[in-house]
Amino acid sequence: MSKTKHETVMLERRKRRIRKKVSGTAERPRLRVTRSLKHIYAQLIDDENGVTLCSASSAALKTPGGNVEGATAVGKALGEKALAQNITLAAFDRGGNLYHGRVKALAEAAREAGLQF
């Protein structure tokens, strides 16, 4: 098995392991973070109804998302959208990625904007 295929398989295993434990409700939606090399995406998802409540991404904000500054902007934008919809609690789903770098910056910016998780 090639190194990249092995990394992809391990990422999928981590995602499944996290999703067994983390689920979103209307009162406490799941904050899902997805990152690629160029962009970072975040969504607040109500898993009971299968609905995305709000979302933000570096692609939509027209900011480079491949760095910490872009992730901070996305976290701040998502936090402001969530507060506009009276959402203050969330369950954090890091999507199999380490809580480090861009993922951590997004989470801290969302906390500063008013989300609690």
Image (cartoon, rainbow, N blue to C red):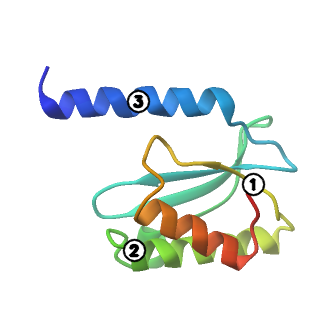
Q: Which residue sits at x=29%, y=32%?
A: 8
* Residue 97 place in picture, x, y as percent: 43, 46
Q: In this image, 50 relative to 15: left or right?
A: right
Q: CA distance from mark 2 to mark 1?
A: 21 Å
Q: Which residue sits at x=41%, y=80%?
A: 69
Image mark for residue 90: 1
Image mark for residue 53: none
Q: In this image, 108 relative to 51: left or right?
A: left
Q: If you read the primary sequence from the N terminus, does the residue marked by circle 2 or circle 1 appear first?
A: 2
Q: Which residue sits at x=81%, y=50%?
A: 28
Q: In this image, 9 relative to 16: left or right?
A: left
The one nearer the camera, 51 or 37, is: 37
Q: Secondary structure at mark 3?
A: helix
Q: From the viewer's perspective, is residue 52 above or below residue 37? A: above
Q: If you read the primary sequence from the N terminus, does the residue marked by circle 3 or circle 1 appear first?
A: 3
Q: CA distance from mark 3 to mark 1?
A: 22 Å
Q: If you read the primary sequence from the N terminus, does the residue marked by circle 3 or circle 2 appear first?
A: 3
* Residue 105 place in picture, x, y as percent: 50, 70
The amino acid on which the numbered mark 1 sits, given as a three-letter code, is Ala
Q: Residues within 10 Å of mark 2 (few under 14, many from 20)?
A: some
Q: Secondary structure at mark 2?
A: helix
Image mark for residue 12: 3
Question: Which quadrant of the figure contains the N terminus?
Answer: top left
The amino acid on which the numbered mark 3 sits, given as a three-letter code, is Glu
Residue bearing mark 2? 68
The amino acid on which the numbered mark 2 sits, given as a three-letter code, is Val
Give yes or no for contact between labels 2 and 1 (Cβ–Cβ under 8 Å): no
Q: CA distance from mark 3 to mark 2?
A: 24 Å
The one nearer the camera, 75 or 53, is: 75
Give yes or no for contact between labels 3 and 2 (Cβ–Cβ under 8 Å): no
In the image as oriented, which residue stretches furthest toward the top? 1
Number of numbered callouts drawn: 3
